[in-house]
Amino acid sequence: MTIDTLPQGDLGLMQSVVAQELLQMDIPARLAYTASDGTPRVLPINHWWTGTELVMATFTGAAKVRALRRNPAVAITIDTADAPPHVLLLRGDAVVTDVDGIVPEYELTMRRGMPAGAADEYFAGLRADGATMHRIAVRPTWVGVLDFETRFPGAAPSAISGSD
């Protein structure tokens, strides 16, 4: 079986060209989780792919941290807006770790999209202020890839089955 024929949900899809390109792009992921009041939430968030985990970060005190610790099940999408859109869909459990200082992957993520001088100044300011953060890591347990050329959503006429 090749990557092109793997069913939606197969972790091997993380090695697909579409997944690898999206993981390296400087675009936000969208993190969906269940808020503390039981209602769904989705928010854009920067991310860094380590090769095994999708790492996101937030500053101490964020409401999403309390919610993720109560219910770690999440869904994530990283996608493009141009046609045809490319979409990476992930599911897994978020592991939240308290960090005294700056989450290393957050710094990598932010430096990817900032001029070097501006990034140096930004991080120097955070360090001077004694910033503390939370590291949010997700190891995918389900992966879906859509490119709208060879891989389509389940309802599309040319769909590969199992993309719920």
Image (cartoon, rainbow, N blue to C red):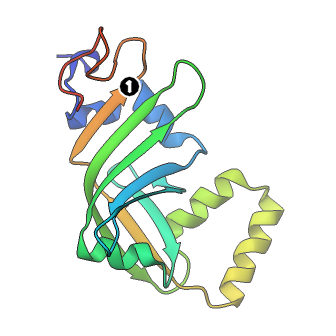
Q: Please tell me which residue is depicted at 29% across the width and 16% down the height of the picture.
A: 4
The residue identified by callout 1 is 146
Q: Quadrant of residue 19?
A: top left
Q: Position of 66 compared to 56: left or right?
A: left
Residue 78, compared with residue 4, is above or below; it is below
Q: Position of 145 compared to 1: left or right?
A: right
Rendered location of residue 160, percent (x, y): 24, 16
Residue 140, compared with residue 43, is above or below; it is above
Disc 1 secondary structure class? strand
Q: Quadrant of residue 81?
A: top right
Determine if residue 49 is in view.
no
**Residue nearest the observer in this picture, 12 or 59:** 59
Rendered location of residue 48, percent (x, y): 49, 54
**Residue nearest the observer in this picture, 154 or 106:** 154
Q: Please tell me which residue is depicted at 79% across the width and 55% down the height of the picture.
A: 115
Give the total of numbered labels: 1
Rendered location of residue 147, percent (x, y): 42, 21
- Tell me the quarter of the image containing the C terminus: top left
Q: Label 1 amino acid?
A: Leu
Q: Please tell me which residue is depicted at 44% across the width and 78% down the height of the picture.
A: 63
Determine if residue 115 is in view.
yes
Residue 36, compared with residue 51, is above or below; it is below
Q: Quadrant of residue 156?
A: top left
- Tell me the quarter of the image containing the N terminus: top left
Rendered location of residue 3, percent (x, y): 27, 21
Q: Please tell me which residue is depicted at 50% across the width and 32% down the height of the picture.
A: 21
Q: Dot 1: few (<14), some (14–19), or many (≥20) neighbours within 10 Å?
A: many
